[in-house]
Amino acid sequence: MEVERDQWGSKIGFILAAAGSAIGLGNIWKFPYLVGENGGAAFIIIYLLSILIIGLPTVIAEVLIGRTAQKNPVGSFRQLSQNSLFWTAVGGIGVFAGFVILSYYNVIAGWCAGYVVESVKGSFAAINDPAMAGEFFSGLSGNPLWTLGFHALFMFMTVGIIYFGVSNGIEKAAKILMPLLLFFMLALVVRGVTLDGAQAGIAYLMKPDFSAINERTILLALGQAFFSLSLGMGALLTYGSYMSKNDNLVNCSLNIVILDTFIALLAGFMFFPALFALGLHPDQGPALIFNILPSMFNAIPAGGFFRIIFFLLLSMAALTSTISLMEVITAFFTEEFNLSRQKATIFLGGVVFLLGVPSALSFGPMRDIHIFGKTFFGVADFFASNILLPLGGIFILVFVGWFWGMKKAIPNLLQGIQGRSNILLNIWKILVKFVAPVLVLIVLLFKIFG
Ligand code: PHE
């Protein structure tokens, strides 16, 4: 039986949903602390170069595979490779990565929702320094009932949206959540830059210190580009498979990349001016959001209100990402096993919840259980974002550039485009065939053996 396939209601619906996938904890939580640890503006410049040279061409290639085949990652690779077992398995790696990433990403997303609740309850009122905030955070994240409860709640919300399908679920959610997210962020940026002493933070984001750059910076920037763009595991492929062949794929991809980059930069402008205004150092690491920030709001006029807004926007950004991960595995199960979407989502929600339990407990009862020197959570994150995503990226590039080949890729790419530019087309070809795969391979090898 051929499953009736849903499509995006509009081009803007696709752009918002895909940008929603890309924009997430990677932009708002990880990007600012990487900037803070790696020299501010200098890191930003390297990041922007990675996005331009590798990110954008790979986004186009991945969306193109999905739009051409109109199937889930496994089905798409199988169809375009004419049943090659190897390439079908490559699609399978993407679905597998979807399971792994969703299982731990949802745990952090759950914390964000939990912090909305704590902010509303007024739990941070008496927490005035980062050390106290850190203790409070360890208490919550180490409490199995609290972490697992919000992990379950977030999974429930994710399933609740995916249950209603592509145009009625994902697209509707993105159309509501994305503008709201932007609005909340702008409110926080205005709050931050109007604080006394904010200029130092703005300067930090604008004046590059190139002495802070070394090979590690470049590796981090490239890895971050992949994670932030949701590249290399079939999320953009799956979203692309619901895209109309009459829409301009290059233009859509460009919009997605610009939105994702803009929001990451905006997140920088949301944190650093406020951080500097309060006399804190920028290099706070991953603790930035859950340790430093909650207490920081107490020193800001109307901070209690802005704290709620902040964790709300963080939860919304995470939600549009968890639904994209869920859609990858849902599309796979409905199409390959002929399950109904409703049954598949409920079943998968349960499975991913269980898979996430060891990650959730990695901050409490299981914090001393180490594999390769990392907690379960640490291993899942390292394995997915440092190995599976770049590997998936290389496969996508090699597939489009060499195996499926440009002869077939280009006519499909040009469908829906009026007026082609041969120069841009040639640049894309060179980046996809040579430059991007080689650079990603170098990064991957460095990450594994470096
Ligand atoms: N891009 C998302 C973020 O920045 C994370 C993500 C990765 C989502 C891979 C889907 C697939 O948070």
Image (cartoon, rainbow, N blue to C red):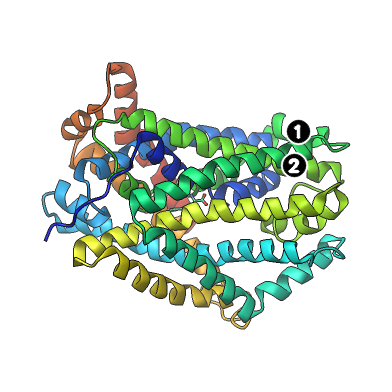
Residue 394, given in percent of the width and then of the height, sits at 34, 46
Q: Is residue 54 visible?
A: no
Q: Is residue 211 left or right of residue 435?
A: right
Residue at 46 percent across and 36 percent down: it is 257
Residue 8, given in percent of the width and then of the height, sits at 32, 43
Query: Does mark 1's beta carbon lie closer than 8 Å to ligand 1?
Result: no
Examine the rendered structure and indicate whether residue 183 appears above or below residue 337.
above
Residue at 62 percent across and 37 percent down: it is 265
Around disc 2, counting alpha carbons within 10 Å, would you say few (fewer than 14), some (14 to 19), or many (20 or more)? many
The disc label shown at residue 272, or none: 2
Q: Earlier in the sequence, mark 1 or mark 2?
A: 1
Examine the rendered structure and indicate whether residue 201 appears above or below residue 384.
above
Residue at 21 percent across and 34 percent down: it is 409
Badge 1 element: helix
> Do the residues bearing badges 1 and 2 touch, measured as CB atoms within 8 Å?
yes
Residue 403, given in percent of the width and then of the height, sits at 19, 42
